[in-house]
């Protein structure tokens, strides 16, 4: 086997941490000695041992003189766990092959330098594009200071997310609904507008697949959310934030806070609504590295018009409604050259639906 084959194995291991490692990156590691794999590991959960340490612990023989293949530069600072570079040096690993350097300023290239200073042969950049793509959320979060935003919506073939009477359950197939729950489990937070809460009274939890419940965020500029809503009723069990332009001392804000809701007082934008960019910055301070926006139309339109989204997952049902709520409102585009362009990552079939997964360019 060649170096790239071992790195491919490390990438597959890293992906096992999806939905659990965040806000840390997903990392996989493989130890090879005399042409044999002697240890494997991945970062299983935030706060637990890193991939390199798990691979060393998995080894059934001495790792001295071995080669470590790791998808991301080993950490070199004290966080919730000790530096991985120290462990690598102590164990006498002779060579380290790294997929990509770390974007975290506490680590970036310092881990490589420490290993080289200890006399370890270090190679970087093997399958770098694949390693970066796996952790696109982490790199975006580190490089911009903002969460990675996914817009998810289910619409008819003619671009409607609800009937003219506001009914939207269920446009997509049961298989597509299961996908939505899988996506929820892989994001740190789910965000909806108050209109969605008033129309659908959603739970925004993970029920159809195994996985953690994301933090729930409602953009509710004027605190219209009913106290009887499922989100408020379950706020003590599943963290729930309401972003509002109201002051935390507002009577209704205090009432909701007493029910377990976290009130985020955010400055208003020129239209008197919650400033979404400032909201994202506030969520970043809570270590929220990824947010999935589930609607409705006004919120989706706002994220697109302000260029705050990085990914779109569109579920397209083979149905036509005619009149109804359009998915995206006016983006003030007057020429085709101004259209927001999407790079399609994959197109798949789920039940009767088509799923388009793309990145906004």
Image: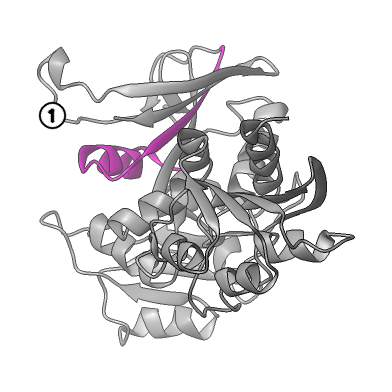
Using residue 330 as the reference point, say whether residue 288 is left or right of it.
right
Q: Report the coloring of the rendering.
A: one colour
Does any portion of residue 223 appear in the rendered image? no
Q: Which residue is mark 1?
A: 332
* Of the pair 24 and 39, the residue shown nearer to us: 39
Residue at x 76% of width, y 63% of height: 56
Does 281 sit above or below residue 201? below
Tag 1's secondary structure?
loop
Rendered location of residue 88, percent (x, y): 63, 67
Does 11 sit above or below residue 111? above
Using residue 299 as the reference point, say whether residue 54 is left or right of it.
right
Q: Give the mark count.
A: 1
Rendered location of residue 281, percent (x, y): 30, 64
On the image, which quarter does residue 267 sit in? bottom left
Q: Quadrant of the C terminus?
A: top left
Rendered location of residue 339, percent (x, y): 21, 21
Does 224 sit above or below residue 263? above
Rendered location of residue 24, percent (x, y): 53, 62
* Of the pair 38 and 300, the residue shown nearer to us: 38
User: Is residue 313 found inside the magenta-colored segment of the image?
Assistant: yes
Residue at x 53% of width, y 33% of height: 168
Q: Which residues fall within the magenta stretch?
A: 292-318
Residue at x 51% of width, y 86% of height: 258
């Amino acid at each position: 086997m060649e170096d790239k084959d071992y790195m491919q194995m490390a990438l597959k291991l890293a992906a096992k941490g999806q939905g659990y490692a965040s806000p840390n990156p997903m990392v996989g590691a493989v130890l090879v000695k005399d042409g044999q794999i002697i240890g494997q590991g991945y970062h299983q959960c935030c706060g637990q041992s890193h991939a390199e340490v798990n691979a060393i612990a998995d080894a059934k023989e001495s790792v001295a003189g071995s080669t470590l293949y790791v998808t991301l530069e080993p950490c070199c600072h004290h966080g919730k766990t000790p530096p991985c570079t120290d462990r690598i040096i102590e164990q006498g690993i002779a060579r380290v092959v790294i997929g990509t350097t770390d974007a975290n300023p506490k680590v970036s290239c310092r881990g490589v330098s420490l290993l080289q200073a200890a006399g370890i042969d270090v190679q970087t950049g093997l399958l770098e594009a694949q390693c970066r793509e796996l952790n696109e959320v982490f790199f975006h979060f580190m490089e911009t200071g903002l969460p990675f935003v996914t817009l998810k919506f289910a619409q008819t073939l003619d671009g409607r997310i609800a009937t003219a009477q506001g009914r939207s359950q269920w446009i997509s197939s049961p298989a597509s609904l299961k996908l939505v729950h899988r996506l929820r489990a892989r994001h740190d937070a789910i965000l909806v507008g108050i209109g969605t809460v008033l129309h659908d009274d959603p739970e925004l939890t993970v029920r159809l697949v195994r996985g953690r419940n994301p933090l729930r965020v409602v953009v509710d500029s004027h605190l219209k959310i009913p106290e009887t809503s499922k989100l408020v009723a379950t706020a003590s069990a599943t963290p729930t934030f309401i972003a509002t332009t109201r002051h935390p001392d507002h009577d209704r804000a205090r009432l909701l806070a007493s029910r377990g809701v976290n009130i985020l007082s955010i400055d208003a934008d020129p239209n008197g609504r919650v400033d979404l960019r400032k909201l994202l910055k506030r969520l970043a301070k809570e270590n929220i590295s990824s947010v999935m926006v589930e609607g409705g139309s006004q919120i989706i339109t706002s994220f697109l018009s302000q260029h705050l989204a990085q990914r779109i997952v569109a579920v397209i049902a083979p149905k036509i409604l005619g009149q109804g709520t359009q998915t995206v409102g006016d983006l003030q585009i007057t020429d085709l050259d101004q259209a927001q362009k999407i790079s399609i990552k994959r197109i798949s079939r789920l039940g009767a639906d088509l799923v388009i997964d793309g990145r906004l360019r």
